[in-house]
Amino acid sequence: MALNNYANLQSSIANWLARDDLTTEIPDFIALCEAEFNRELRIRNMETTATVTINAEQIALPTGFLGVRSFFLNNNGKTKLTYITPYQQFDTQGSSRAGTPQAYSIEGSNFRFSPTPDTSYTANLVYFKAFDSLSASTTTNHILTNHPAVYLYGSLYHASNFIRGIAPDTVAQWRQLFIEAINQIKHMDETEKHNGSPLIQRSGININNLDNV
């Protein structure tokens, strides 16, 4: 059976397991697989561009956010926003400080900016976004279309943690095949990737200078 959509993937998992009584559980195995490869992968096909309005000290992260690729204010020229840790931000910014944001941290599900914006700014954000989860309405995505082995072996591995009696060698084999499929994606992406910025920039700004803003 072709692994070309959500329904066929579920059927293939059931066939590989030789089980017809896991209709309720198989979507859980797929969801666990998705959570794992979204944690592992940071590839070009996950890069998404958004226009962000910065008009408060904190704004919500985009849906599916995994990490920043680049972050620039659209002001006179482009001002690069540089990542600093929440501790660095706490240490250098008082709540009354306002001005043109120069840096950001991530706290919970929010960006936090330093200084606090004194007006509304527009910024370009390129970020890594989790692949859309498969469902009845989202029947495929980049991973299933181009790398179906990731879904198959990852789901089989997570199924093996639920089902009693599967031979340990089989469990280990599915896990290894899952890891190899993910590593193949990483290797392909590295060989094709254009030069770009690291996931998070941690240099380029002297946080002590924020005291003078």
Image (cartoon, helix red, strand yellow):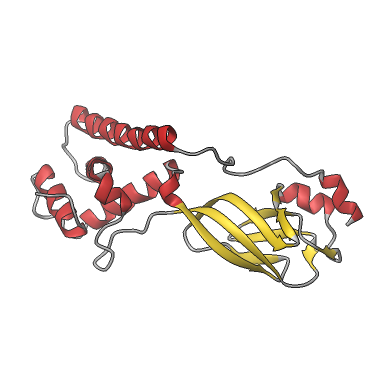
Q: Is residue 32 visible?
A: no
Q: Quadrant of residue 177?
A: top left
Whether residue 69 can be seen here: yes
Q: Residue at x 63, y 54 (%)?
A: 71
Q: Nearer the viewer, residue 124 or 181?
A: 124
Apparent side of residue 143 relative to residue 156 in the rendered image (left or right): right
**Residue 127 location (% of width, % of height):** 53, 53
Q: Is residue 101 left or right of residue 69?
A: right
Which one is nearer the viewer's eye here, 35 or 70?
Answer: 70
Pinpoint residue 103: horizontal percent, then vertical percent. 73, 53
Q: Residue at x 12, y 43 (%)?
A: 16
In the rendered view, does 63 fall on the left or right side of 77? Answer: left
Residue at the farthest front position: 77
- Taking the spot 19% from the left edge, 41% from the top edge, the residue there is 164
72 horizontally vs 89: left or right: left
Give the residue at the far top of this rendering. Answer: 169
Answer above or below: position of 44 versus 184.
Answer: below
